[in-house]
Image: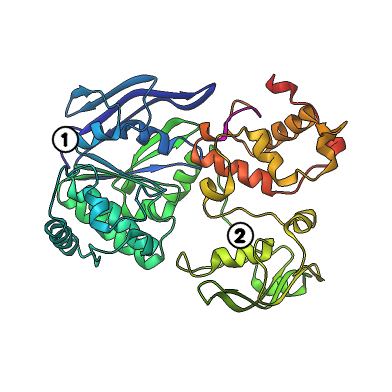
């Protein structure tokens, strides 16, 4: 690792309306090291890196590259300085091929696509990636799509690669391949910033760890001088006690909350089963984890339980009551909440206010109606209480969903998906006036 930092962020602050996303953030990035940027959802990790990549413009502070101050107004400026970013939501054109995505914006006029396909094939092979350069991106598994994003950065000869929650959609095997690539990249003298909230990954791949909380840097440590307990305490701002686990056998005596009996969903258009003969029980007080590569039926299973897709066969029971034929509205009344996998596409309407997004789930409830119109003060009060209960960093119920960080957007969806409050407990959102 070089003695002098490759990139310095000095006293960077970024505000969204009245919300402080980053406050007086200073950190250094050196070539030949993996810098882990660690923190809870909404801690400001992605925001500070989006400032460095030119997606956001800092309201205060400076960016220095090799000791010289730089102005980065766009990703194009960042790429010209050797900075690339793989975002949590991939920036790929699904209808284009692998090669077309990699050279997009970098090649002008008429060109020989086969020539560039050969370049991409050689680049992929040199890093151990098995990718067809002529494949359409939309047809590729999510793990391969991430490799396409990495190849974009390699094609641009990026000296700094920013990876935002890169293992969120990967299997353990794919994650291991990614970690190996990260370490190879730094051995070649380049820098990697690894944004995550997973402590295991941090201890596996990082050389240095910067911990963020509430938009501020609260720790800058060498990996070999810290441990998961210390990092957890820095992340959440309080002592973390050793976890205790309940043995599975203890759940056997609890009542069954949810049961699926031989559930199948067949896609008639493509004549394939999205899920086939699924049976399981979830007891009260139990958390059931479902593992698998993205695209192997998890979304269809959630849609079946929530009522968004009808069953081809089988039964779904909630607290012993069959709900297989119940519409979505009735399942919501029965207490089923759904947090979708893609918050931008299915979870929120980004141009709408938080109040409006909260209203979307329960438009049918009488609690929100007064003299035939929406009872806005009551709805504002409900949203305000949810914002406080889930620690959503927002200016208030009138904040536009798009203005929130990704972590805070996820908190809004969780807040809306949780159990509702009795109407007699709701109060006007006078605290936000």
Is residue 385 magenta-colored? Answer: no
Please give the residue where the numbered disc 2 appears in the rendered image: 244
Residue 326 % position (x, y): 77, 64
The quadrant of the image that shows the N terminus is top left
The quarter of the displayed image where residue 267 is located: bottom right
178 relative to 429 in the view: left or right: left
Is residue 399 magenta-colored? Answer: yes
Sequence-wise, the earlier of marks 2 and 1 is: 1
Of 359 and 180, the residue lying toward us: 359
Please give the residue where the numbered disc 1 appears in the rendered image: 3
Q: Nearer the viewer, mark 2 or mark 1?
A: 1
Residue span colored magenta: 397-401
Q: Is residue 277 above or below residue 174?
A: below
Q: Is residue 58 above or below residue 241?
A: above
The colour scheme used to paint the residues is: rainbow
Residue 146 % position (x, y): 33, 56
């Amino acid at each position: 690792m070089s003695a002098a930092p490759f990139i310095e962020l000095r006293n960077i602050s970024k505000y969204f309306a009245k919300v402080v996303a980053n406050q007086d953030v200073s950190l250094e990035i050196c070539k030949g090291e993996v810098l882990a940027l660690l923190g809870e959802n909404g801690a400001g990790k992605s925001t500070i890196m989006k400032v460095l990549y030119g997606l956001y413009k800092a309201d205060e502070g400076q960016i220095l590259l090799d000791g010289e101050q730089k102005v980065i107004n766009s990703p194009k400026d960042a790429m010209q300085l050797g900075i690339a970013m793989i975002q949590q939501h991939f920036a790929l054109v699904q209808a284009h091929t692998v090669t077309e995505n990699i050279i997009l914006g970098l090649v002008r006029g008429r060109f020989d696509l086969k020539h560039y396909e050969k370049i991409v094939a050689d680049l992929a092979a040199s890093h151990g990636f098995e990718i067809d350069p002529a494949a359409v991106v939309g047809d590729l598994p999510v793990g391969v799509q991430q490799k396409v994003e990495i190849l974009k950065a390699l094609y641009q000869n990026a000296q700094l690669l920013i990876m935002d929650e890169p293992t969120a959609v990967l299997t353990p095997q794919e994650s291991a391949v990614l970690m190996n690539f990260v370490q190879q990249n730094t051995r070649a003298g380049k820098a990697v910033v690894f944004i995550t909230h997973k402590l295991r990954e941090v201890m596996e791949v990082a050389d240095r760890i910067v911990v963020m909380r509430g938009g501020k840097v609260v720790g800058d440590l060498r990996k070999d001088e810290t441990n998961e307990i210390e990092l957890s305490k820095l992340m959440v701002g309080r002592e973390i006690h050793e976890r205790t686990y309940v043995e599975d056998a203890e759940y056997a005596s609890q009542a069954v909350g949810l049961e699926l009996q031989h559930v199948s969903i067949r896609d008639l258009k493509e004549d394939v089963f999205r899920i086939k003969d699924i049976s399981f029980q979830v007891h009260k007080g139990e958390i059931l984890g479902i593992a698998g590569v993205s695209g192997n039926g998890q979304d269809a299973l959630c849609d079946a339980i929530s009522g968004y897709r009808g069953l081809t066969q089988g039964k779904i029971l909630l607290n012993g009551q069959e709900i297989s034929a119940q519409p979505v509205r009735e399942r919501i009344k029965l207490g089923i909440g759904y947090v979708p996998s893609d918050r931008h596409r299915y979870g929120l309407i980004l141009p709408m206010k938080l109040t409006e997004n909260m209203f979307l789930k329960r438009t049918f409830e009488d609690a929100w109606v007064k003299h035939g119109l929406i009872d806005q003060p009551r709805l504002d009060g409900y949203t305000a209480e949810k914002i406080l209960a889930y620690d959503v960093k927002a200016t208030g119920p009138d904040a536009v969903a798009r203005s929130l960080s990704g972590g805070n957007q996820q908190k809004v969806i969780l807040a809306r998906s949780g159990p509702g409050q009795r109407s007699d407990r709701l109060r006007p959102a006078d605290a936000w006036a």
